[in-house]
Amino acid sequence: MSQSRRLVKGGRIDRDKPLSFVFNGKTYQGYEGDTLASALIANDVRVVARSFKYHRPRGVFSAGSDEPNAIVQLEEGAATQPDTLATCIELYDNLSATSQNCWPSVEFDINEINSVFMRLMPAGFYYKTFMWPAKLWMWYEGIIRKAAGMGLAPKHPDPDRYEAIHTHCDVLVVGGGPAGLAAALAAGRTGARVILADAQCEPGGDLLAETDELEIAGEAASNWVSKTLAELRDMPEVRILERTTITGYYDYNWLTALQKVTDHMGPDKGGNLPRQRFIKIRARQVVLATGAIERPLVFAENDRPGVMMASAVRTYINRYGVLPGRSMVVFTNNDTAYQTAIDAVRLGAQVTVVDARPAPQGDVVTRAEALGIQIMDRSVITNLHGRMGVKCVTVQHLGEDGTTLLGKPIPFSCDLVAMSGGWNPTVHLFSQSGGKLRWDDDKTMFVPLAGPAINPSRSVGCCNGTMDLPGCLAEGLAAGSKAAKDAGFGTGRAPKAIKATARPEAPLRPLWEVSCHGHKSRFHDFQNDSKVSDLELASLEGMVSVEHTKRYTATGMGTDQGKTSNVNALAIMARIQGREIPAVGTTTFRPPYTPVSFGAITGQDRRELFEQVRTTAMQPWHVANGAVFEDVGDWKRPRYFPQGSEDMHAAVLRECKATRDSVGIVDASTLGKIDIQGPDAAKFLEMIYTNAWAKLGVGRCRYGVMLSEHGMIFDDGVTTRLSDNHYHMTTTTGGAARVMGWLEEWLQTEWPEMEVYCTSVTEQWSVASISGPKARDLLAGLTDIDLDPEAFPFMAVREGSFAGVPARIFRISFTGEVAYEINVPTCYGLHMWETLMEHGKAHDICVYGTETLHVLRAEKGFIIVGQDTDGTCTPMDVGMDWIVSKKKADFIGKRSFTRSDTAREGRKQLVGLFTDDPSFVLPEGAHIVDTATPKPPLRALGHVTSSYMSPNVTGPDGVNGDKGRSIAMALLQDGRNRMGDTLYVALMDGRVKTVTVTDPVFFDKEGERTHG
Amino acid sequence: MPNPGLTPGSMFLSEYAMKSKYSIFSLLRNSLSYHQNWERKWRSPDPKPAYDVIIIGGGGHGLATAYYLARQHGITNVAVLEKSWLGGGNTGRNTTIVRSNYLLNESAAMYDHAIDLWENLSQELNYNVMFSPRGVLHLAHNVHDMQEIGRRGNSNYINDVDAEFITPDQIKTMVPIINLNCRYPVMGGVLQRRGGTARHDAVAWGYARAADSLGVDIIQNCEVTGFDIKKGVIKGVKTNRGVIKAGKVGVVTAGHSGVLADMAGMRLPIESTPLQAFVSEPLKPIIDIVVMSNTIHAYVSQSDKGELVFGGSSDPYVSYSQRGAFNQLEHVVGPLVELYPIFSRLRMMRQWGGTVDVTLDRSPIVSKSPVKNLFFNVGWGTGGFKATPGSGHVFAASLASGEMHPIAAPFSIDRHYTGALIDEAAAAAVAH
């Protein structure tokens, strides 16, 4: 049989379902129900990985998410998953995994040379060297980076699908061990909505690793688990989430969970199911039943393959039917490891117990002795041999002081060391919830500090320091009942107690580090290769704070976040510093409890569902007519409409010219539109905008600028009075959401007494803006509105019908031509557009995009907020003194105008620029200087904000023509006093362009065309 | 000009002989004695009754200030008071990015001064801070972004700060894992080659060790509870370890600057909000430069240990909690997976938060105060780490002379009254 360490019977594996898998290129067999770790152990694969820093050979260490050693690269190609714990991978057929951080192979890793030079590489050695010569650091760093890191990232996009969902419940029970099951049962029976989340493939916790000797409610514990789960499954309000780890505990009882939905099936086997589900849970009450993690013992060479946690060894024996060693030394300072010894010896293993305690007594010891297990009391392992796997340990007596080694070292041949240094309650989530810890000297562990919780939760069972089974069940029942009551269900009285086998435990003997001879490596943090000597070095160098020690030695900074290492490290630090353990303090437990894939956090919001693209009703027409799009916020807007082989430059020149010659049309639907209603609407607008609004007549429009509190331009647009208390505001496309939030912020936080209601109606209206000398002619045939300039003047709105549908038509202009913005309900948008295009043919209509829009408005000197202004511009800076009311008592930003710098002369002001070379378009962002021979660093006078080729503007030299004439807008220091001056624009390639400062209105200065 | 109120010390005082030098040779030598003879990096002194200068806050900026006071200005009778462990605030919580390609002249001067110091910092401190000028790339995803980087690149050029425009093809070569045609297509970028990352803890430790060896007292677990101000002049500070007299006091705190100012009877134009960051599990190298994107408010680099280090915008609500809301993190993760599809299968290993003090214009306050001889160097917002050496350097000069260093002068608190804001965020619509 290939699985040489597989027991002939037993375990929760399905021997009828053999699976084959590949590890490091070799094919092995396992069974359904195995983890990769248990299957590797069954096949006697001892070296599974290499350590992070020293590349020491490492084997499977634990049986859960606390695993610091057996970290592998799962699968290859797009579905590869680096840094995966072999102990948490459920075996599936054809699984493939490889060791990481080693070359050429895990058995022979060239970087094990680091191990030879270990003495040169203590904690923080890299802070002391690699400094000479200074120039070589980047080369050193390259080598360090290559040597560091662990797994390989995938090279291809993730083929899998994820879900992120929200849910809520009355009681969330975290952990499906005995305490959690009891809590879920008690809460469930009240009718409360309960979620039981358990990280394993089946709930039961440590009961799954028990033999049938252990009884609950008068039967084998495993039967009780099955019956309890059956009862829970029958409750309509109870959900059991298997393979679900609660990863984070945030404020207001909001928790995150990662459910592995199809990971256990293997790549491409999940069908329509997502690979993982990220569940965000809001729970009225939380019961934490997260168990405890066994503490390693810190002794010489304790990282060698074959040194495992005693409880893990027992799990492999009883749950997976694997005997990890035939000749076993159980090294312990407490009673629990004796169960491992007993179970192993019954299955034929040779077992010796090395117990640090003098003359251990009690039921479990007696049972072990009865089975003929040799118990060496007052003893510790002081050395270990076997680089690629334990071969031999040396045992010596331990003095009463806990450090002195007595007597002769006795060698023991063995192939497995099962160790136990006691238990640490899994308090991570409790701590994340804001809970504080208390050091319990009797139990030698950190336990949750009782008291009012910041977030309503209760810790029960082992994670509360209650280590005996009857106690766990009782606490679970009590907490489940109370949590349900606090959530509004039941009486709060616990159901009848559940009887269970009690295993009284004798006290442990604290043993934080085991003395050894010479300077051997004693690891407390396996994943990050941190040793006792590193903690001593940190302390020697003054790194006394626990956070300094952690950062200096990398203790607890691995992917396991120190699940097995932190408390040992704290205790060793306490010894070094001569302090009590609680005085050393604890580090912060940071989410997530176990790593969470980014894909799961993203959920379904990816690819086409990520930040959905916004398009207007006219999008099909734009696409059909060859529009080139640009992203503006979340919108896709046509940038230009090339004809034939036109590039953008040619298309824009044509579009610009046609609009001024006949009529142009642009899709303006993306501009923000906010419907403002209420008796205080006018008063509100008076505060929001700088100019006067109270007297604006019904049916009239007004351009407004809104400022930040600093008096700087924040957004602009045209707002129209539709009736006395009803306004229609427009904003920039990119600023729509920001303005909406701005209005709401002022209304809700500063002026709650105002009765004003703002509603975003951007999506409700489709807008076509037509402008040009023939705009009126085009519109005339399509609407019942009287378009006579007397009847429908500039800056007015009329409601009527357009092409048979209801419309609001605004006579406003961003091009300086006669222009109409036709608004129809979005469902008629495409109809409106197609009608205009069809009838426009007779008027030489030209469709244009944002680029032409920008040129046309620049010809008129109209600003684009965010392009020609930058959050440091007042209306006066951009030449809009006229828009700032001198009469109004107040408006947002007014007070800032009294600040000396805001009020001073010579600020940067908006100007126009003509290049001497009419064919050269200045790069936007280029800076203006006053020297013809610039060489950085320079004092810039300003910068170019907008720059285009215009076919309509005639320059000072009279140059115009089909190829166009370059125009630019700029913010220039004291710009208005520099009209006509010659200045220079320094380009980044060293060239210098001569420019003449001019008025920013380049075309139709008197505005005759607009009013025509 | 030396201030007559201060005792000019000397860096040559034998009392605090320079610590033995770190090098490969000292490592070799100490390895022979199993590293049992290393010196302390810094002493753990009790506070003296009085100091020439007290620096409140033992983060990077405070320690750097103390170091430069001693090194450049010979003022060694200096204490750094830290309420907890040194480097434990934002110095130990940031995403370690260093760059100086700021838009506005005042910012560019400050941060570029810092880069000049970063470049030789390991050697200057004899402590490897792992400054890695691997390049910082800002992506542009739309026309507006292109205009923004266009202006910024030109501004950098004018200020003699290095900036290069990069095409999408070049970006793909430099960052092969990027998806150029994502929801926010990458149209270009601007690269600062002198920018990069540094090892954040080492910066605090390196400055602390160097300052200590020049005689500066670094006093941890010493919380300032009040100021002793007489007739508008600072006389000392009250702490949980007693009253300590001081000729001058520099407040160099982050996260609680407003609290300190309140003790001096002032209000600062500062709001404190959480800023979160997170790292992936360690991986072999996959991204060699720092890539930032303002449109999606996310940035990424890879630490020397192999973890991908991510950050985004600060939380929108004020809080001193050093933890933020998860949805803020989701706003960073989603775009990151879109921009780098391979990140989907990678995993978040650890997330954390810090508290950032944000001023009205998101630029720091490096300034005198209405109280004579009480100076502030606070409000660095979300971008203080990169400035550490420059900030300490100019603040030390200001403390030493009593007049603000020219680079620090524009960052006066007065700008909030005059309106001469240094509004980088408004100007470029970017976070920094």
Image (cartoon, coloured by chain):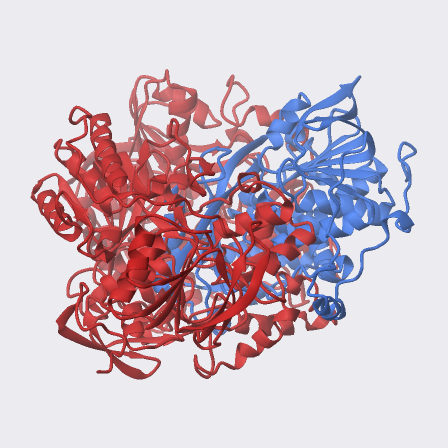
Q: Does B414 sit left or right of B91 as displayed?
A: right
Q: How many marks?
A: 0
Residue at screen point 26% across, 80% down: A28
Image quarter hosting the C terminus of chain A: top left
Can see residue A987? no
Q: Does A958 sit left or right of B323 as displayed?
A: right
Residue at screen point 43% across, 79% down: A106
Residue farthest along the left direction in this orientation = A234
Image quarter hosting the N terminus of chain A: bottom left
Residue B54: % across, % down: 77, 35
> Closest to the observer: A502 or A641?
A502
Q: Quadrant of residue B79?
A: top right
Vertically, is B329 above or below A136? above
Can see residue A821? yes
Q: Does A782 sit left or right of B244 as displayed?
A: left
Vertically, is A377 above or below A324? above
> Closest to the observer: A733 or A823?
A733
Residue A694: % across, % down: 40, 19
Vertically, is A317 above or below B13? below
Q: Quadrant of residue B77?
A: top right
Colour displayed for chain B in the image of the structure: blue
Residue at screen point 78% across, 47% down: B212
Colour displayed for chain A in the image of the structure: red
Residue A113: % across, % down: 57, 79
> Closest to the observer: B10 or A809?
B10
> Closest to the observer: B385 or A704?
B385
Residue A102: % across, % down: 46, 77
Q: Quadrant of residue A456?
A: top left
